[in-house]
Amino acid sequence: FSFLQERLRYMLVLLLLLHSTDSFYVPGVAPINFHRNDPVEIKAVKLTSSRTQLPYEYYSLPFCQPSKITYKAENLGEVLRGDRIVNTPFQVSMNVEKKCEVLCNFPNKPVVLTVEQSKLIAERIREDYYVHLIADNLPVATRLEFYSNREEEEKKKEKDVQFEHGYRLGFMDGNKFYLHNHLSFILYYHREDVEESQEHTYRVVRFEVIPQSIKLEDLKADEKSMCTLPEATGSAPQEIDPTKENQLLFTYSVHWEESDIKWASRWDTYLTMSDVQIHWFSIINSVVVVFFLSGILSMIIIRTLRKDIANYNKEDDIEDTMEESGWKLVHGDVFRPPQYPMILSSLLGSGIQLFCMILIVIFVAMLGMLSPSSRGALMTTACFLFMFMGVFGGFFAGRLYRTLKGHRWKKGAFCTATLYPGVVFGICFILNCFIWGKHSSGAVPFPTMVALLCMWFGISLPLVYLGYYFGFRKQPYDNPVRTNQIPRQIPEQRWYMNKFVGILMAGILPFGAMFIELFFIFSAIWENQFYYLFGFLFLVFIILVVSCSQISIVMVYFQLCAEDYRWWWRTFLVSGGSAFYVLIYAVFYFVNKLDIVEFIPSLLYFGYTTLMVLSFWLLTGTIGFYAAYMFVRKIYAAVKID
């Protein structure tokens, strides 16, 4: 019991540390100081929809264009996310109000949308697309106000405010389509403290928009491109009829407000979009349950093992021991090399590569160095780290391959460097062809694909070979017992020792530890939310490692007690059992949370889910395998073998 108390105390200290880590923040970019009247550039990022999962470039729709279109140079992560950051014709100056201004064309000569363009806009409105803009690297958000289920008296006083990323392109009413053609920008600035003689400097700390749909006839505009907005009650929205040409004006207004928010905390608005309170409660709940279960498991296993070892080592009862059944009986076969040792060691090498990459990425992100303000940094870091971790993957794979009596180390190294990355690249390439067909900005451009191939064969492959060479030359793992020449016969196994039953049983505990976090990760990937709770994620990752290791040890112990010594492959498969539950959860999420109906978005969802499940299986399988291997070596080293 004191052991459990000690664990809980350690866990609470860790939680407190993680809570402080969550609020610690290293901004991704240096702050920009503006003087009054300085231009604040509004850029467009992309159009997104959780219904189609296909991002599009801003100018794929007939929006007003500046005289010269310039795209921002992007990092690898931004390209893979489908961001195409481009300038827009919005003229915004620091702390200068604009009541209403026509964006392009003159009031007497409105924008004319052709039938094709009208059809495209109507289709994007039907598909529920959002437009994403940025000002000073801050994404635009739409404020949503609603009353929560509070007491009646409180309701009158206070509304709950939540923010939605981007703004809706338009809306539907019946079978009619309406476009948001007027944008009311609300920008918040923080006035910096300066000496009396100096001019005040300002920093942008929030960027909101109120999109409106206003009919061309209701927008009263003059020759100077100024316009007056109609009264809210009397105005009709701007309809887009997909069967004919449409005339409209794109207009915008700018309003500035002073804010107390400091520049360093300006992202907090975007990051508190979901209820953190529930997150904390559910995570602590699963942490306590998992540590409690794993504590009980450890105690049972340790007590049973001590009893076993004490019985096996009693020298006076040699005859009884000979008749004993159990794991000691298979000592001459337990380290017999399995079938396909090269493939097993290659998969485990890739698992080590993934483990190192994920651990470093989550730890660095937890320190705030991969915050959402450094757009695409997380994905870029993950790609490069996976390439460089090839040296560790190769080393562990090479050493294990030699332990399993393998001889063809060059072929083994090539297999390690190409098996898992080859599957990932193949699936991504097929999906990319479908995205190309849809002309989406989510399609990876051909030069980027060539660059990724060069990284794979120019960085990852040589590093895997290097690691494999040293791993293969190193002394193989020291197995405490010799292997018999003739394999022992395996008795008939009970139904619950079946591989599939094992996968189902072993997957529950690790999946239970992390399924709450899985919901937030899925929301971030599929519903364009920001994911920033890396403190939680680090804790969940530790719990996952602990629970995978323990469940794997329990399963291999039961297997050896049933006198089945073929544990190498089985442990790897069974430990990755939680990946099966992740797959089931992904299907549940697709059916219940997402509104995807078309073929290509569904294909993308299940294609990327397959990659996620495969990677997760490799990761958990590798953790479980190494835990089981250490356990088997320890217990056979503890008994006396004649």
Image (spheres, rainbow, N blue to C red):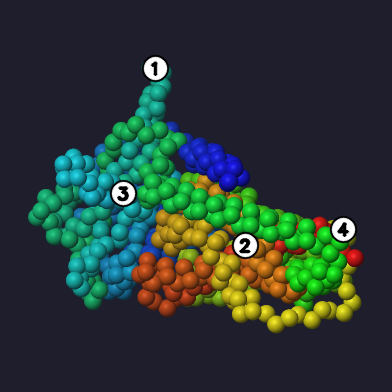
- How far apart marks 1 and 4 lie (CA) works out to 70 Å
Amino acid of disc 3: Gln
Depth check, mark 4 against mark 2: the one in front is 2
Q: Which residue is mark 3?
A: 162
- How far apart marks 3 and 2 lie (CA) works out to 41 Å
Q: Which residue is mark 1?
A: 197
Judged left or right of residue 543, residue 209 is left
Amino acid of disc 1: Ser
Q: Which residue is mark 2?
A: 551
Question: Mark 3 or mark 2, which has the lower sequence index?
Answer: 3
Give residue 37's position: percent from left, percent from top. Answer: 34, 34
Question: Mark 4 or mark 2, which has the lower sequence index?
Answer: 4
Depth check, mark 3 against mark 2: the one in front is 2
Depth check, mark 4 against mark 3: the one in front is 4
Question: Could you classify mark 3 by the number of other residues whose Cα lies within 10 Å: few (under 14), some (14-19), or many (20 or more)?
Answer: some
The residue lying toward the viewer, choosing from 45 and 392, is: 392
Residue 424: mark in rendering: none
Kindly give the residue lying farthest to the left in the view shown: 234
Above-or-below relation of 204 to 617 = above
Is residue 78 at all visible to an observer of this figure? Answer: no
Q: Secondary structure at mark 4?
A: loop
Q: Badges 2 and 1: C-beta atoms under 8 Å apart? A: no
Q: Which residue is mark 4?
A: 474
Amino acid of disc 4: Lys
Is residue 551 at all visible to an observer of this figure? Answer: yes
Judged left or right of residue 34, residue 505 is right
Depth check, mark 1 against mark 4: the one in front is 4
Q: Secondary structure at mark 1?
A: loop
Give residue 163's position: percent from left, percent from top. Answer: 33, 49
- The residue that appears at 18% across and 49% down in the rendered structure is 227
The residue lying toward the viewer, choosing from 531 and 181, is: 531
Above-or-below relation of 400 to 150 = below
